Amino acid sequence: MFNKYFDDINIGDKIVSRGRTVTETDIVNFAMFSSDWFPLHSDVEYARKTMFGGRIAHGLLVLSMASGLVPLEPDYTIAFYGIDRARFINPTRIGDTIHVEGEVIEKEERSDATGIITYRQTVKNQRGEDVVASIMKVLVARRKQKSKK
């Protein structure tokens, strides 16, 4: 999706990413980097007694992994612009394989050089269950206009 200029991306364009399996190491490393050691993610005995019946991945870890699954080409993609309405719908467990499905829902010209692409992003697990849903925004380069003489 982000391997072309803003001008060449259309509302309705879709993407399905490759998959990635969530590991215990991912969860521990994320807890270390974020300082989020909430016991639902880091304490087996605590997590076993919760409604989830065991440890689950941090929602923000899953969202971060999803951002890495969406291919971004530096010649076209300028920057991540924002996220709206993120919802953590179902837990992601150690051993789950996630992938991203996205669809362009809006385009906004910002200048002669850039535009914002808004897309609906759904992270799904290997069973096809939605685990995270959000609206993402990316700043994308526009095709360079030929100067008028």
Image: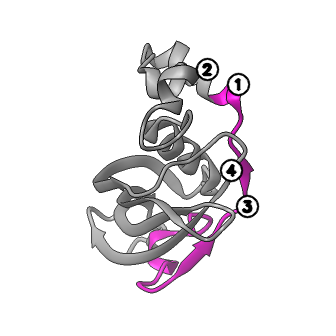
Report the residue at 49% width, 49% height from top.
Answer: 91
Q: CA distance from mark 3 to mark 2?
A: 23 Å
| Nearer to me, 104 or 148 | 104
Which numbered disc, 1 or 3, marks the residue closer to the eye? 1
Q: Earlier in the sequence, mark 1 or mark 3?
A: 3
CB of mark 2 within 8 Å of CB of mark 1?
A: yes
Q: Which residue is mark 1?
A: 25
> SS at mark 4?
loop
| Residues rendered magenta in the picture | 1-26
Amino acid at the residue labelled 4:
Asp
C-alpha distance separating marks 2 and 1: 5 Å
Please name the residue shown 27% across and 71% down the image: 108
What's the distance in space between the residues labelled 4 and 2, CA to CA?
16 Å
Secondary element at tag 1: helix
Label 1 amino acid? Thr
Q: Earlier in the sequence, mark 3 or mark 2?
A: 3
Amino acid at the residue labelled 2 = Val
**Which residue is found at the position 52% from the left and 44% from the top?**
62
Q: Which residue is mark 3?
A: 18
Viewer-nearest residue: 68 or 35: 35
Q: Which residue is mark 2?
A: 28
Q: Is residue 138 left or right of residue 64?
A: left
Quadrant of the rendered image containing residue 18: bottom right
Amino acid type of the residue tagged 3 in the rendering:
Arg
The residues bearing labels 1 and 3 have C-alpha atoms spaced at a distance of: 20 Å
